[in-house]
Image (tube, rainbow, N blue to C red):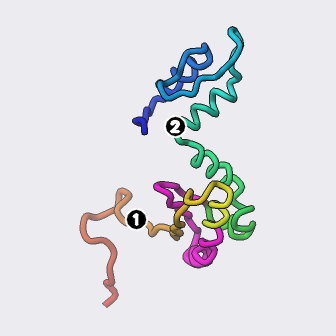
Amino acid sequence: MTQHDPDGLDLARQIAARARGAKATPTAKPKRRKSGDLEPVGEILADVVEQQGWNTHIGLHQLLARWPDLVGQVNAEHSKPDSYFERVLTIRAESTTWASSLRQLAPQIVATLNAKLGQGAVERIVVIGPTAPSWKKGKLSVPGRGPRDTYG
């Protein structure tokens, strides 16, 4: 696997090289074309996506863009996909009640995503509820242990 290039310059150079007809990387598949014919940009991008191993991520993002179709309209109004890392999809729910409801649906969502993306694309789903407010912010915050029972 290649190193991540945060600027995207290497990827841009690869695409430009392919558009000019040069080989993008040593592992690039050679295209048999008549001399002088240009390769369509869609094919170039598809090859780069495949070489970089982005197929699963792109497919997942396309499916998650249709979140209401996966979990139902009511559940989608109270939750959203938060992150995807190492085959684990994290979903954030707006309350603990909705988080519990989505935990019950998690096996069905995993099965649906794997059916559309390929087996093993998503191994599990973690559903998290809302985060607690922080008491360490603002001009009136006081250093110390934070709020506790002081009502006697």
* Residue marked by disc 1: 134
x, y percent for residue 93: 58, 68
Residue located beneath label 2 in the image: 52
Q: Which quarter shows the C terminus?
A: bottom left
- Location of residue 81 with respect to 74 vertically, above or below: above
Q: Amino acid at mark 2?
A: Gln
Residue 120 in the image: state x and y as whole percent: 55, 60
How far is the residue under mark 1 from the one under mark 2?
39 Å
The circle drawn on residue 62 is none
**Residue 138 belongs to magenta span:** no
> Residue at horizontal 54%, vertical 27%?
28
Left or right side of 102 for 133: left
Residues drawn in magenta:
81-109
Lower sequence index among marks 1 and 2: 2
Most extreme residue toward the top is: 36
Describe the element under mark 2 as helix, strand or loop. helix
Mark 1 residue element: loop
148 horizontally vs 50: left or right: left
Q: Nearer the viewer, residue 126 or 115?
A: 115
